[in-house]
């Protein structure tokens, strides 16, 4: 289904035409009509499915059509991390390039006092759309910088991550300030009981859209080492001794383990840096800048902050421990093999993690190659699956459609996509 088959207005379609977006993804095809119809919605879809456009496009289209207060905050988009908030803001600038009457401001955490002052000025001048992390938005609300009493749209993006990061109470505090007749839209990669409970609290008779998790890209060479926990660092030492590895991300599910891994890698003289929620925003920005610039070879990261990583040239992803669900596994290894490149994904499977890795193999409908452990590491445990598949040994394994030339008589077809964020869009600033 194409975007032109929806009721999105012409200004939105013009921007999509410029960006060479014609065919909708499954999540967009199912969510956009429901949101345009004014329904509350909960969407379950992984990162990379196009969910940002699935809610931004219909909301921006309705705001541009008019009928909303010109002197009020009309939409709040909640994000768990600064990195995701920045990505949403960039998408907002691109999709809203022709919306001269719709303004926006991004509000997210950090220790930069100048940044806070700039946010405060932007909020006081007025903005139709606020893209915010929960804690930062609450700070502005408590200081009287934001009035949400006439809000029309409340969006929770990556709601499961917000709850994982302890933002549940913040979200509920913000929700209490909203008018009764607003539209609530929630997206989550998974649907655990805590998300169901939050949805029951915030949404009224919502439409439910669930998109199956897609399989990893075929270009990703997946394999695993079945080993005991103390052997993992020895395997990493072997991998880095075998070749000068750069552009590597090592994932672990716990920030304390990230700290330990980083210290051990530094003792091995591996050029690495940690990325976890205990770092200040300034420290996280500095780490990401140095990693993107090639000043750091290896990034050691938790899942929570890693969802904001958007780098195309990652050579290898190492799962130091096995994610607890297939969605997180797919998301982690999806950091590599981007932009038509090849990539390598290696997972360390300890005896305690075998059942989780077996679940991932069943989801992928394939047996992931089990690498032979290096001789200096010793023998690992026997790989035992939790289902009917056979056991194996851990120590001895194996554009889019053609452009529509006459659509706009070439009025703005020459504008490149990158220019979407360059135009100031504010009726109030």
Image (cartoon, rainbow, N blue to C red):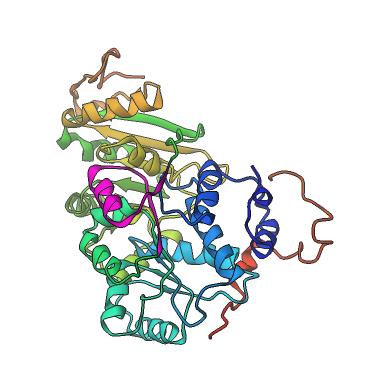
- Res 86 visible: yes
Residue 67, quarter of the rendered image:
bottom right
Q: Could you tell whether 317 is left or right of 57 in the image?
A: left
Residue 151, quarter of the rendered image:
bottom left
Magenta stretch: includes residue 314? no
Q: Is residue 123 above or below residue 194?
A: below
Q: Is residue 70 above or below residue 339?
A: below
Report x, y in % for residue 58. Answer: 55, 58
Report x, y in % for residue 175. Answer: 29, 66
Q: Is residue 322 above or below residue 12?
A: above
Q: Which residues are magenta?
A: 182-208
- Seen from the viewer's position, the closer of residues 22 and 62 is 62
Report x, y in % for residue 265. Answer: 25, 50
Residue drawn at the location 48% of the way across and 47% of the way down: 48
The N terminus lies in quadrant: top right
Q: Could you tell whether 154 is left or right of 425 in the image?
A: left
Residue drawn at the location 34% of the way across and 23% of the way down: 362
- Seen from the viewer's position, the closer of residues 79 and 369 is 79
Magenta stretch: includes residue 189? yes
- Seen from the viewer's position, the closer of residues 191 and 32 is 32
Report x, y in % for residue 30. Answer: 52, 44
Residue 211, quarter of the rendered image:
top left
- Res 271 visible: no
Residue drawn at the location 26% of the way across and 41% of the way down: 320
Number of numbered discs overlaid on the protein picture: 0
Q: Could you tell whether 410 is left or right of 43 in the image?
A: right
């Amino acid at each position: 289904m194409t975007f032109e088959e929806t009721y999105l207005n012409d200004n939105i379609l013009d921007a999509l035409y410029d960006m060479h977006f014609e065919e909708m993804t499954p999540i967009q095809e199912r969510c956009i009509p429901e949101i345009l119809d004014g329904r509350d919605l909960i969407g379950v879809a992984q990162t990379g499915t196009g969910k940002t456009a699935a809610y931004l496009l219909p909301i921006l289209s309705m705001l541009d059509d008019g009928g909303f207060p010109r002197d009020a905050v009309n939409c709040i988009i909640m994000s768990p991390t600064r990195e995701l908030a920045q990505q949403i803001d960039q998408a907002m600038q691109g999709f809203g390039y022709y919306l001269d009457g719709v303004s926006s401001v991004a509000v997210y955490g950090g220790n930069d006092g100048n940044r806070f002052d700039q946010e405060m000025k932007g909020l006081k001048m007025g903005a139709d759309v606020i893209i915010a992390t929960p804690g930062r938005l609450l700070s502005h609300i408590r200081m009287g910088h934001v009035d949400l009493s006439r809000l029309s749209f409340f969006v929770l993006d990556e709601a499961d991550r917000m709850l994982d990061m302890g933002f549940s109470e913040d979200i509920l505090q913000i929700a209490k300030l909203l008018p009764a007749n607003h539209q609530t839209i929630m997206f989550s990669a998974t649907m655990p009981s805590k998300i169901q409970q939050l949805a029951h609290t915030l949404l009224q008779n919502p439409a439910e859209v669930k998109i199956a998790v897609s399989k990893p890209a075929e270009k990703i060479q997946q394999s695993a080492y079945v080993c005991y926990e103390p052997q993992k660092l020895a395997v990493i030492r072997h991998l880095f001794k075998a070749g000068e590895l750069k552009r590597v991300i090592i994932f672990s599910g716990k920030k304390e383990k990230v700290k330990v891994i980083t210290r051990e890698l530094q003792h091995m003289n591996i050029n690495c840096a940690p990325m976890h929620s205990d770092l200040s925003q300034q420290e996280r920005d500095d780490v990401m800048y140095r990693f993107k610039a090639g000043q750091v070879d290896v990034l050691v990261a938790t899942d929570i902050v890693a969802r904001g990583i958007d780098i195309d040239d990652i050579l290898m992803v190492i799962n130091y421990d096995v994610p607890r669900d297939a969605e997180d596994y797919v998301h982690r290894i999806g950091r590599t093999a981007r932009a038509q490149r090849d990539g390598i994904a290696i997972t360390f499977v300890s005896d305690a993690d075998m059942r989780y890795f077996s679940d991932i193999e069943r989801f992928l409908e394939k047996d992931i190659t089990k690498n032979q452990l290096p001789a200096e590491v010793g023998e690992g445990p026997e790989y035992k699956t939790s289902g009917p598949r056979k056991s194996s040994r851990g120590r001895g394994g194996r554009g889019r459609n053609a452009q529509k030339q006459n659509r706009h008589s070439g009025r703005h077809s020459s504008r490149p996509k990158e220019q979407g964020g360059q135009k100031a869009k504010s009726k109030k600033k």
